[in-house]
Image (tube, rainbow, N blue to C red):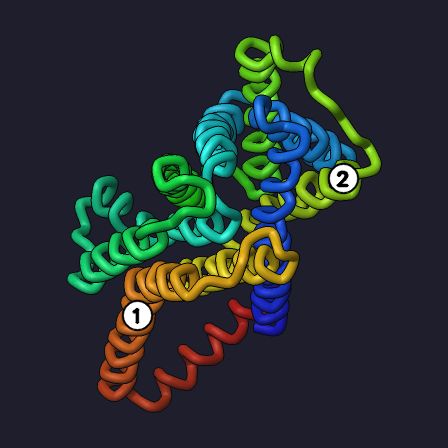
Amino acid sequence: MVKTNKQHSIGVILLSMTAIFWGAGFVLNAELLKETFFKTPALLNAFRFVFATLCLLAVFNKKIRFNKQVLLYGGLGGVVLFVAFLLQATGQKYTTPSHSGFFTASYVMFVPFIAWIAYKKRPSWISFIGVAVAIAGLIVLNFDNDDMGFKNIWLGDVLTVSSAVLFAIQIFWTDFSLKRKKIDFVQMTFWQVAVAAVLFVVYSAIFEGKHYSSMTFDLSYCWWRLLIVIFGGTAFAYYSQTYAQIHLAATETSLILACESPIGAFLSMILLIESFSWQTVIGGGLVVVAVILVEVIPGIVNRRKQLNVTTDNASTTDGTEDTTESASESDTDELT
């Protein structure tokens, strides 16, 4: 039990740090796209994933394997990750960091519906209410918004929501692969990041190569921003997420990661990248409420049901059997 609790605590700490890195990433990516990579968003992600791959390879080189199974599960996750980040980066060119943060975090809402498609298990009615609340948040965030032009912001938000759907698929695929013991978390982390890196390099070379010569790269401006998004927001973040999906419940994981959106909005306003707006607070708040409705409340209800079932079963067993079973469980916990 001690080891399990320790792993749980480590998972919570790692995920909390990931939420901070990802929240800051919305601001840093917006700055990098505006100043250097506006015409080459895929190149920015190529930098992120290539150097993150090298970092993971340096740390886990003795644990990395190359076979059909790890390529299948990790590679497919990497393809989804590539498309998700491509849509997100393109959307960030047209919308604000706070919008990008709120709508990227909405991936939490889509996971139950993806599970519905995969496992034929219908989400609760609360999930449908959550989607309606999220749509209301989208409308509030975009209503009469003149910061960058309504059409541009709307396009950016739609692209970001599309990326959120793909992030949800990636999370579901990672959870499926790990829980079914198809691949371990180190292989899953490395191959997802590595495959995404290769795809970004190829995509950028083909579709953005013509813009390379016109880029102005200010190293003094970019270097520390790139370091944070590469090592903190990519290598560390995806290792932490994959590790946490083994040791934490999905509800806990989703709730902690959802904190990235208010962190991103708060930093954006503190750094004066965008002005304070009640529209942003209310609209973003609705998105956060939607996340809670879809992911947190059903998790609490399910835990209570399981607790009631456990209590009922315990009340029908003999005291001696109860003690024996508890001792057996304790021994198992110590071994794990």
Query: Of marks 2 and 1, which one's residue comes earlier in the chain?
Result: 2
Q: Amino acid at mark 1?
A: Ile
For residue 291, above or below residue 170: below
Give the image location of residue 221, x and y in percent: 78, 38
The residues bearing labels 2 and 1 have C-alpha atoms spaced at a distance of 38 Å
Query: Residue 278, relative to residue 105: is it above or below?
Result: below
208 or 260, which lies in front?
208
The answer to whether residue 161 of the structure is visible from this angle is yes
* Residue at 61% in and 40% down: 29
Q: Secondary structure at mark 1?
A: helix
Residue 179: x percent and y percent? 43, 47
Residue in the picture at 36% in, 84% down: 322
Task: Report the residue marked by disc 1.
Answer: 297
Whether residue 73 is visible, yes or no, is no
Is 153 placed left or right of 184 in the picture?
left
Q: Which residue is mark 2?
A: 59
Establish if 194 lies above or below 26: above
Q: Residue 304's spot in the image, x, y percent?
A: 29, 77
Camera-side residue of 241 and 208: 208
